[in-house]
Amino acid sequence: MLPLAHRRVWIAGACLIAAAIVTFSLLPGPVVATISVYDKLGHAAAYFLLAWWLTGMYERRRYPVAVALALLLGVALEIAQTLLTTTRHLELLDFVANAAGIALAAILAYAGLGGWAGRVERWLGAGAPR
């Protein structure tokens, strides 16, 4: 992890994003017979946000860990939807959408936009790490 002055805040943000993804993934939902573009965009956006947040907290050499964590959450939730809910089920296209959002975040991070949490702290004038 980057040497962040407000490390707990950044970790709490990641946990809140993950908790929101878990909650919305496991809430009872309507049984949908067709593929919804908006549903897939929602998946991509949620997992983009998670991966973007994680790559913002870590140095470049740790980006693969951030990507793997986000992908593992997606796989686990697709399985959990099948096992724990009656209105949701494992859907390959959901996982593809999740992976697309994660991939976009990783591409942007590797393009030089990762590690942004440290830049935000410097911009805000945060003190040295505790």
Image (spheres, grey):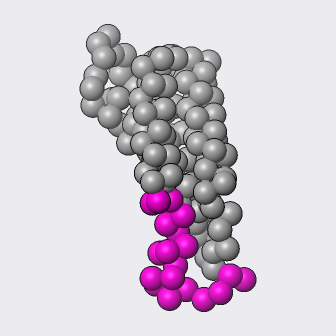
In front of the other: 21 or 69:
69
Q: Vertical placement of 20 versus 13: above or below? A: above
Q: Would you place residue 118 above or below residue 46 in this image? A: below
> Where is the C terminus found, in terms of image quarters?
bottom right
Residue 44 image point, x, y percent: 40, 37
Q: Residue at x 65, y 68 (%)?
A: 2
* Number of callouts: 0
Q: Is residue 125 above or below residue 83?
A: below
Where in the figure is residue 24, as x and y percent of width and height?
46, 38
In this orientation, does residue 26 appear? yes
Q: Residue at x 47, y 59 (%)?
A: 112
Name the residue: 58% across, 35% down. Answer: 71
**Where residue 59 sits in the image (x, y, percent)?**
63, 61
Q: Is residue 124 magenta?
A: yes
Q: Position of residue 91 (x, y in %)?
A: 47, 17
User: What is the span of residues highlighted in magenta in the rendered image?
Assistant: 112-130
Residue 20 visible from this viewpoint: no
Q: Residue at the far front: name it.
A: 111
Side of 26 where 41 appears, left or right: left
- Front residue of 67 and 18: 67
Left-right relation of 48 to 117? left
What residue appears at the point 47 percent right and 39 percent down from the top-left corner? 103
Quadrant that contains the N terminus: bottom right
